[in-house]
Amino acid sequence: MKFLLFVAVIGIIIWIAKGALQPSGSLSTDEAAKLLGIPADADADAILEAHKRLIAKVHPDAGGSAYLAARVNQARDVLLKRLAG
């Protein structure tokens, strides 16, 4: 019984931690472009190149944080979604 309680507590902690690492709020197209350092009307190649350059600096494996990496990914997704229509 103690083991089940322990597993449940660990599960809740992981669930809460994952939620805390997600970026809160949405980015506008202008905010996403500023975050990636590109014009708001950039094409897909420019978006992907800027994302690649920035994610290499902010990724947790490179000493950055999960939050920053998620925010950079979110910016890429917002801009690519705008292009898709």
Image (cartoon, helix red, strand yellow):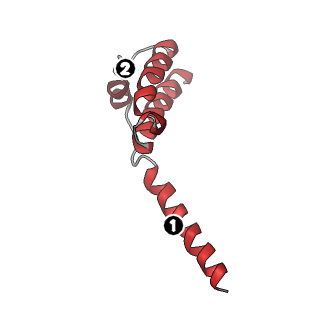
Residue at horizontal 33%, vertical 31%?
31
Residue at horizontal 39%, vertical 46%?
25
Report the front residue among 34 and 40: 34
Compared with residue 65, is residue 31 higher up or lower down, i.e. above or below? above
Compared with residue 15, is residue 54 higher up or lower down, i.e. above or below? above
The answer to whether residue 28 is left or right of residue 46 is left
**Residue type, mark 1 in image:** Ile
Residue at horizontal 54%, vertical 62%?
15
Give the label on residue 40, or none.
2
Q: Distance between the residues labelled 1 and 2?
A: 38 Å
Which residue is disc 1 drawn over?
Answer: 13
Q: Position of residue 28 (x, y in %)?
A: 37, 34
Q: Where is residue 34 in the image (x, y as percent from the top left)?
A: 32, 25
**Residue type, mark 2 in image:** Ala
User: SS at mark 1?
Assistant: helix
Q: Quadrant of the C terminus?
A: top right
